[in-house]
Every structure is written in C-alpha cells, then in structure tokens.
Amino acid sequence: MLQQSKLDSLFHALSDGTRRAMVERLITGPASVSELAEPFDVSLSAIVQHLQLLEECGLVKTAKEGRVRTVNLQPGALAAAEKWFQQHRERWERRLDRLGDLLDEEDEKETKPRRKS
Amino acid sequence: MLQQSKLDSLFHALSDGTRRAMVERLITGPASVSELAEPFDVSLSAIVQHLQLLEECGLVKTAKEGRVRTVNLQPGALAAAEKWFQQHRERWERRLDRLGDLLDEEDEKETKPRRKS
DNA sequence: TTAATAGTTAAGTGAATGCTTCAGCAATCG
DNA sequence: CGATTGCTGAAGCATTCACTTAACTATTAA
C-alpha cells in the first residue's frame, strides 16, 4: 500500500500554487534558486523555504556547485500521488458501472413488486 | 487552464490522511456522518469539519433527510487534480525522451565520431 | 412525554504554514 | 584587494489547521 505520510507530504507540497509553479518550471529543465525565484513576487528566502519542502518530500533534488545551487525535478516523484488517483478512480468507476447495472435491472423489474430494504 | 485556487483546495483536501480515508470509504458507497466517523479515533465534530472542507472543494455532496445527513462522493470531482498530473507527466516524459536522444547522440559521437542524420 | 440519536455550532488551543527582515558567508568579478 | 552575487539561517508574525469540549437543535423511539 502507498504510505500515508508520503502521500500527505506530496499532496501538501502540491497544494500551494507557488510550489506547483516551481515544479512546472522545473519540467522544462533544471534551474538555479534565483532563476526559480525570478517569476514570483516573494523574497528569495520564501522560495528557499518552498524548495526545502519540495526536497523533503522527494519531488526535487538539488546540488551546489560553487555558489550556485541547481535544482532538478526528481523523475518518478509524482508517481505515488498519481497512483492514488489511478487506483481510486478505477474502483470508483467500477462501482458506478455496477450501480448502472443495478439500476438497469431495477428498471426491468419496475412492473413487478419490489423488495423492501 | 485549470484554476489555481481549485487545485489548491483539492490538493489540500487530499493532503490529510483522515480526509483521504473518508473519500476512499465513500467510493464504496454513500454514508451517514456517523458511519463516516466510526473508523476514526476523533470526535464527531472533527469529522464534520473535515466534511465541510470536502464539500467546499466539491469532492463531496451531502443531503439531510430527517436527522441523518447522507454523504456522497461527487463524480468527476477528482478530475481537476488528476488532470494536473496527466498534463505534466506528459510534458516531463517528452522532455526526458528528448534528453535521452541527446545523450544517445553524444554517446555515438564519443565512441565513433561520425555524423548522425 | 421523555429519552436517545444524529448532527450542528461556537470557542479555544497548540502546532504548522507562508511569509517577512536582517545578518551572515563563501564564491566570483572588476 | 574590495564589491557583488547567490544563497543560507534565525527570528518574528499573522493566519490557518486539526483538534477538543461543551452547549445546543431537531428528529425519532419507547
């Protein structure tokens, strides 16, 4: 089973628009901290704090060379979260299908007396 | 484009294990508030507060009949969040592919310096 | 009518969140 | 060299979070 606390931290990381935008930026390729910060109207410090969170939950890896820290998206990091959707959408859709079948059956029985619940 | 605040609230809703478990429970079918609360070791009040949040972000619909409130999962509610993953995984994978191609070319140049079409 | 059930609402608490400013510090440029 | 760049770390602050308890309302059961 998927680990709860991992999902907690992944979904939490993605629940902030700035962090999502940072992730989206990193899809196009690695970036330095300042490059990452540039589009946003917040202090560099705030960005670094978002970055720490992204790194802690494994979405991102960083490496410092000289005075520049380069940030890379971690391949497969989104997998755990995406998997949650896939699994549950599947179950959900199967249930809706069965429900549809039941309703169809009920339709057919409509003329006959119905069972009480 | 997907709306930011909607994604914020969806991901936030899913970032809590209790709320995810409630959603998972609702996949199996509708439930009353007390039924929903039963597996958890928190007050009914806490569950009601989670429920409000789930309802505000559109994951869930409720209807009160007599003194019982019945909670239903809202079909397609997870779509917005799931879509975010699909879109970005796609872009990310395309980028990794291109990156792979580039690296292959570099490989070939290194081992045998020849032109590539 | 009384009692139990199902849920609602308000107020409060401690911890976490997202941000700021400011004071650094090491790498690099002029 | 000294100045600038790129980042780091700590402290503080307002807000939100997840939760509690407790008092309350409305519906149903005995």
Image (cartoon, coloured by chain):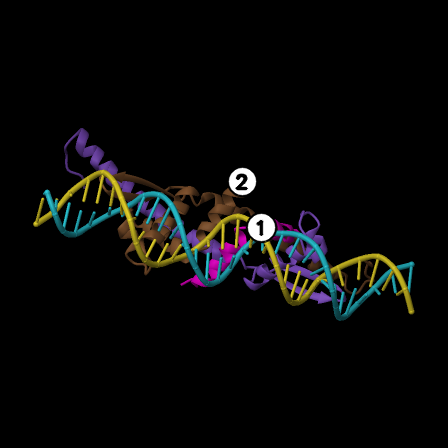
Chain colours: A brown, B purple, C yellow, D cyan
The magenta stretch spans residue B5: yes
- At a point 36% along the width and 46% down the height, the residue shown is B93
Give the quarter of the figure containing the N terminus of chain A.
Answer: top right
Chain label for disc 1: B
- At a point 72% along the width and 55% down the height, the residue shown is B34
> Against A103, is A83 above or below?
above
Chain label for disc 2: A
In the drawing, what numbered circle is on residue A3? 2
Which picture quadrant has residue A2? top right
Dot 1 alpha-carbon crowd within 10 angstroms: few under 14, some 14 to 19, many 20 or more: some
Q: Is residue A107 left or right of residue B58?
A: right
Q: Which residues are magenta?
A: B1-28
* Secondary structure character of the magenta stretch overall: helix
Q: Is residue B67 left or right of residue B7?
A: right
> Against B9, is A82 above or below?
above
Give the quarter of the figure containing the C terminus of chain A.
Answer: bottom right
Q: Amino acid at mark 2?
A: Gln
Dot 2 alpha-carbon crowd within 10 angstroms: few under 14, some 14 to 19, many 20 or more: few
Question: SS at mark 2?
Answer: loop
Closer to the camera in the image, B46 or A12: B46
Measured Cα–Cα span from mark 2 to mark 1: 12 Å
Q: Is residue D21 left or right of residue B114?
A: right
2 and 1 marks on the same chain: no
In the drawing, what numbered circle is on residue B20? 1
The magenta stretch spans residue A33: no
